[in-house]
Amino acid sequence: MRRLASPQRLLSTPTRRRTLAGAAVLALAGAVVGPALAHEDAPRTGEQWHAHHRLLVSDSSNGDIVVVDDGEVTARLSTPPAPISLATNRAGTAAFVMRGRDTTTDHLTMIDTAYDAEHGEATVPFISRTVVDKSPGGVHNGHLPEFDGTVGVAEEGAGTVTWIEPDSLPSLSGATSGQLRLAGPDHYTFVPVDQPGKGDDELVVGYVGRGIIASYNPTTGAKNWQVNGCRGLHGGTISDDQRYVTFACPTKLVTIDREQTSPTPISVPYPGETRSAVFSDGTKDVRWGSTENAHTTIQRVDTSTARPEVSDVPLAVAPHSPGRGAGVAKKTVRTLLRQSTTPDGRTLLVLTHQGQLQVRDGDTGDLRYEVATSPATPLDFHEHTDRAEAPEVTATNEAAYATVPATGEVVKVNLAQQQIVERIKVGGMPTRAVLLTHGDGHERPEDLH
């Protein structure tokens, strides 16, 4: 059998030596001439601009995240189809996109927003990582649990919280800093108790299926306490002084006093048939609670005491004063589709099935006015876990930004002028939205017209 020449022998043959010598001459010539022509120094093209606001909007038609700077679309980032949740860290430097859960693979996409909120400096955003996760979750009002800049993403299919360092995401190095193991796979409501410098941070976790509420040390994973009896729990909040933690059960609110070593939960029944499932922060200690299914009220919850005060605020609109002899006109029905508040909590924003944005007092819930922003949504509309389909409203203290899935727009409402001042065409099916703002987060006067 003929043996093949070894690599060493092939390199030592006369013909091979001549070929290599010729190649070396050409390579040397290329080294002298090529780089000088193809790789010479060139001036860098600047990619930085000022943006007072950077709005991130998820497009449920294709998975894009649309980036809008001061009303202008500046970038589109492609993520796996059917996003269902969108969140940012507090600094606004990273965004987290979670895919719907009707496919065999769940994705978590992390984005470098390329935005410096302190100085209003913007550049080109980019996807830093996309990973396969097990039912990622944990988003509440556009945010995830966060302690000292470290963000927690729940793997609800695995029963863990993975802690992520946003500053490490764009690099090749590891970006995780440990895991918190929970009681098991479930759907969770997180209430972080972040008290810098006090050394007693807590992550209070409500379990929907198990019906338990438990407090953990986010660093060590040690369990501080646990209470039972809230199966079907969804939604949680905390008082301004971070003493009272309140969770929403199907028929009642449950409050825990964190100053008790072994807390005894206090139950407060809802005043009517409506329950709470999500909360938005109003003025001091006031929280606004709501749920799906086209309810005609929103719940005002005062969290300043161990026994919160709960009341229903009707959303119906009073008619204009009827003329003499016209009788008493009926109120116009309004049903809640989505809610939010301004950063200062002074304004409550309610999107209705009837296509209105209601602007209400953030303390009392009294209606100030309403603006028609979108086509009507069927009363039997219900968002499932396959993708986001509901509109979203986010705001500065002076303006509200409402997505309109049916028309592919983001509508901007000047809260003082009580009118739409801009319709931003983003295309597709815009649903979830988060807003990054420069400095104190207020609008510039020139942007309010």
Image: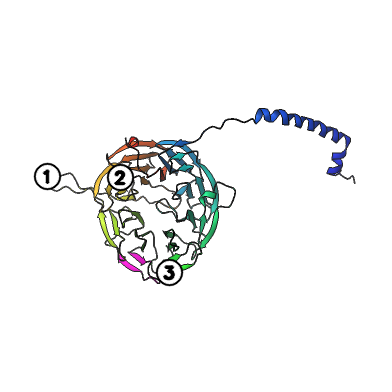
Crowdedness near tag 2: few (<14), some (14–19) or many (≥20) residues, C-alpha within 10 Å = many
Instruction: Give the image location of residue 209, x and y in percent.
Output: 43, 64
Among the 4 quarters of the image, the one containing residue 56: top left
Q: Which residues are magenta?
A: 252-269
- Nearer the observer: mark 3 or 1; the answer is 3
The reply to whether discs 2 and 1 touch (Cβ–Cβ < 8 Å) is no
Crowdedness near tag 3: few (<14), some (14–19) or many (≥20) residues, C-alpha within 10 Å = some
On screen, 380 above or below 41?
A: below
What residue is rendered at 28% in x and 46% in y?
359
- The mark nearer the N terminus, 3 or 2, is 3
Q: Amino acid at mark 2?
A: Leu
Instruction: Give the image location of residue 354, x and y in percent.
Output: 30, 45
Labelled disc at residue 326: 1
Whether 72 is among the magenta residues is no
Q: Nearer the viewer, residue 29 or 154?
A: 29
- The answer to whether any part of residue 208 appears in the image is no
What residue is rendered at 87% in x and 34% in y?
15
Q: Amino acid at mark 1?
A: Ala
Q: Which residue is mark 2?
A: 357
